[in-house]
């Protein structure tokens, strides 16, 4: 977890330099700041310039729910009836509490979203894409230095990027009325409801909303597809590199984490009321900064806060039953769906182990325990960890060699992402009435979320790498211009996603020359197609299925099962 967070957290250091006065920061225009009058009240924004030099309106840091502070901390989000006066959305809002470089803007008052629109008054309303950010449910944000709009704003679409509460502030769950859980997901629902209510004022079409999520955001979308709270709020979905259907146990509470959080900040741990009463009094910064205390070994586990099946305490429930059961009960909202994984995902986590003599020895000796932490396996049953070691690493001790590295690379990748995407894609193409488009991202560009410390070059296709060609990420990477080796990839990725958002089908219709060579058949149970999306497009079948067969045997489900409840 620490390691994963570190990618984002450390690099935020460069942010104060990278963002302010950057080439695309919106200088104020002679015509003055744009104002949009929404049903909740007027909002003042600023002008920005896209990659191809198009001027667009930018509204940042808009509160979509009341500040979740004081009595509202640990409560579900509370919407506004009306804004008081004109909202000033000219400056970037905060990220939610998390460890950051001093000076970086974080605040508990973080239920904000950004809206970007290139054409507020076009005769035909524009398709809307709402991006739910990555960061393991404990870091990152929807801010424009993390997911910037400058590439998508060359397309005729409205882009919304949202924050949601993170870590304990968003996901604490004691399993009783003191903290029923899932508030971070309810924040996302509140943002989607805000979009339904207000996006038309920005030129967006509320009947054509695509939710796009990466990693934690992607897992969230898997839940929104079955949640009763999310029904009717969106019409197409894109899940990149995470899903709620995997070996990860989804239970009724994470009381052990509430207790751990209490211990980390010096609160009593006697019972859930004592824990929650005390946590309400702790400064948000102390809570946000305590994140690394959840690290158990070498930065693992990457996923700490899982969704929770909510018992009924009279609250609006995001997840009344296990998502798989809800799917089998026919509660899926069917809609066109893109699902994807990258070629190597979390492969680089292997080196954190093998490049440290202490860690590799510990992992070798205490495999059952440490593998269950690293690969999100059940903690009470050593069998899966043993089978996975035998199958993917083989006999003999773990060493700093190519055999161990290769095994750990796929174990990290498949346990944290690959198997969940395999399971999601296969379940969806059976249960959904709409097409499922599956892709493997395999483009190695100039930059990556993992760059080799010696060569400073990408060493594979890492988790998050597809984001580089859809969003400016000024906190980490230089912008990709109109020329150079990665330019074409931006043209293609934004065209694919825009086309899908607009038409519910990524395949070209003659109006997008960037993707005229794309021909992407949906995945169906009898022909499990996927697109290899790199500098060329090619269609193949059965993505990494030889590896996932082992996982499916260890964690069996009946993919075809539909309960009698289904009508
Ligand atoms: C592990 O192996 C790599 C590649 O041979 C080497 O560069 C590195 O120093 C080794 N690390 C340790 C801790 O032995
Ligand atoms: C090596 O691993 C140990 C145990 O996790 C850790 O305490 C230590 O900081 C690591 N060393 C480096 C250089 O990362």
Image (cartoon, rainbow, N blue to C red):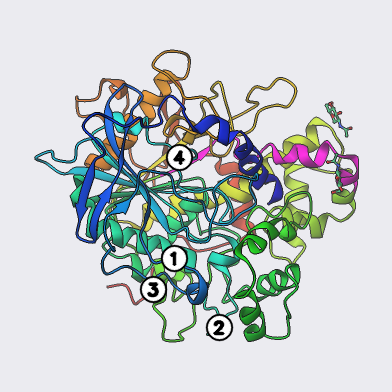
Q: Which residue is mark 1?
A: 67
Tell me if 64 is positioned left or right of 243 in this view: left
> Is 32 part of what is drawn in magenta?
no
Counting residues from the N terminus, which is met first, the one under dot 4 or under dot 3? Answer: 4
Q: Position of residue 230 (x, y in %)?
A: 34, 65
Give the secondary structure at mark 1.
loop
Q: Which residue is mark 4?
A: 147
- Which of the image's four quarters has the C terminus? bottom left
For the point 84% across and 50% down, the residue is 363
Give the secondary structure at mark 4.
loop
Circle 4 Cα neighbour tier, 10 Å, few/some/many (<14 / 14–19 / ≥20): many
Circle 3 Cα neighbour tier, 10 Å, few/some/many (<14 / 14–19 / ≥20): few
Q: Is residue 275 visible?
A: yes
Q: In the drawing, what numbered circle is on residue 304?
A: none
For the point 51% across and 26% down, the residue is 443
Ligand 2 closer than 8 Å to label 2 CB:
no
Q: Position of residue 281 (x, y in %)?
A: 62, 75
Q: In the drawing, what numbered circle is on residue 178?
A: 2
Q: Which residues are magenta?
A: 339-361
Q: Is residue 237 visible?
A: no
Residue at mark 2 to residue at mark 4: CA–CA distance: 34 Å
Q: Nearer the viewer, residue 3 or 374?
A: 3
Circle 2 Cα neighbour tier, 10 Å, few/some/many (<14 / 14–19 / ≥20): some
Res 371 quadrant in image: bottom right
Q: In the drawing, what numbered circle is on residue 563?
A: 3
Counting residues from the N terminus, which is met first, the one under dot 4 or under dot 1? Answer: 1
Residue at mark 4 to residue at mark 3: CA–CA distance: 40 Å
Tell me if 65 is positioned left or right of 42 in this view: right
Residue at mark 1 to residue at mark 2: CA–CA distance: 20 Å
């Amino acid at each position: 977890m620490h390691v994963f967070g570190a990618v984002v957290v450390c690099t935020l250091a460069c942010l104060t330099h990278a963002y302010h006065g950057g080439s695309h920061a919106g200088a104020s225009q002679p015509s003055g700041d744009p104002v949009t009058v929404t049903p909740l009240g007027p909002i003042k924004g600023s002008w920005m310039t896209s990659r191809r030099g198009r001027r667009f309106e930018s509204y940042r840091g808009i509160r979509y729910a009341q500040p979740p502070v004081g009595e509202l901390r640990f409560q579900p989000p509370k919407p506004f009836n009306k804004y008081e006066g004109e909202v000033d959305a000219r400056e970037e809002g905060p990220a939610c509490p998390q460890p950051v470089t001093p000076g970086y803007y974080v605040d508990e008052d973080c239920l904000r979203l950004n809206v970007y629109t290139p054409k507020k008054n076009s005769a035909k309303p524009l398709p809307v894409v709402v991006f739910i950010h990555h960061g393991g449910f404990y870091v990152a944000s929807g801010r424009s230095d993390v997911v910037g709009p400058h590439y998508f704003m060359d397309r005729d679409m409205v882009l919304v990027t949202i924050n949601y509460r993170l870590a304990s502030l968003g996901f604490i769950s004691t399993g009783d009325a003191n903290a029923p859980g899932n508030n971070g997901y309810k924040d996302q629902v509140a943002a989607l409801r805000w979009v339904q209510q207000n996006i038309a004022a920005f030129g967006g079409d509320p009947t054509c909303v695509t939710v796009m999520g990466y990693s934690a955001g992607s897992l969230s979308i898997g839940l929104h597809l079955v949640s009763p709270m999310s029904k009717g709020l969106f019409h197409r979905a894109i899940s990149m590199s995470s899903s709620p259907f995997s070996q990860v146990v989804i239970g009724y509470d994470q009381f052990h984490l509430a207790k751990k959080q209490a211990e980390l900040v010096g609160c009593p741990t006697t019972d859930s009321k004592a824990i929650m009463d005390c946590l309400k009094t702790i400064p948000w910064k102390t809570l946000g900064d305590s994140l690394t205390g959840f690290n158990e070994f070498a930065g693992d586990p990457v996923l700490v806060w899982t969704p929770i099946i909510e018992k009924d305490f009279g609250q609006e429930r995001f997840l009344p039953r296990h998502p798989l059961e809800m799917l089998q009960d026919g509660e899926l909202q069917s809609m066109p769906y893109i699902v994807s994984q990258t070629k190597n995902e979390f492969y680089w986590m292997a080196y954190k182990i093998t490049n440290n003599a202490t860690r590799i020895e510990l992992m070798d000796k205490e495999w059952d325990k440490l593998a269950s932490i690293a690969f999100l396996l059940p903690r009470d049953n050593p069998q899966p960890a043993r089978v996975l070691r035998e199958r993917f690493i083989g006999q003999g001790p773990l060493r700093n060699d190519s055999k161990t590295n290769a095994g750990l690379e796929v174990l990290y990748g498949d346990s944290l992402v690959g198997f969940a995407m395999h399971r999601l894609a296969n379940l969806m193409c059976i249960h959904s009435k709409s097409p499922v488009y599956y892709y493997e991202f395999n483009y190695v560009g100039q930059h990556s979320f993992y760059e080799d410390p010696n060569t400073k070059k990408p060493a594979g296709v890492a988790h998050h790498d597809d984001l580089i060609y859809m969003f400016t990420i000024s906190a980490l990477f230089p912008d990709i211009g109109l020329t150079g080796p990665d330019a074409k990839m931006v043209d293609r990725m934004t065209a694919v996603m825009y086309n899908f958002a607009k038409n519910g089908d990524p395949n070209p219709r003659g109006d997008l020359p960037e993707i005229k060579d794309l021909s992407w058949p949906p995945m169906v149970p009898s022909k499990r197609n996927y697109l290899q999306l790199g500098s060329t497009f090619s269609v193949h079948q059965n993505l990494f299925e030889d590896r996932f067969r082992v996982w499916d045997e260890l964690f069996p489900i009946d993919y075809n099962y539909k309960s009698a409840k289904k009508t």
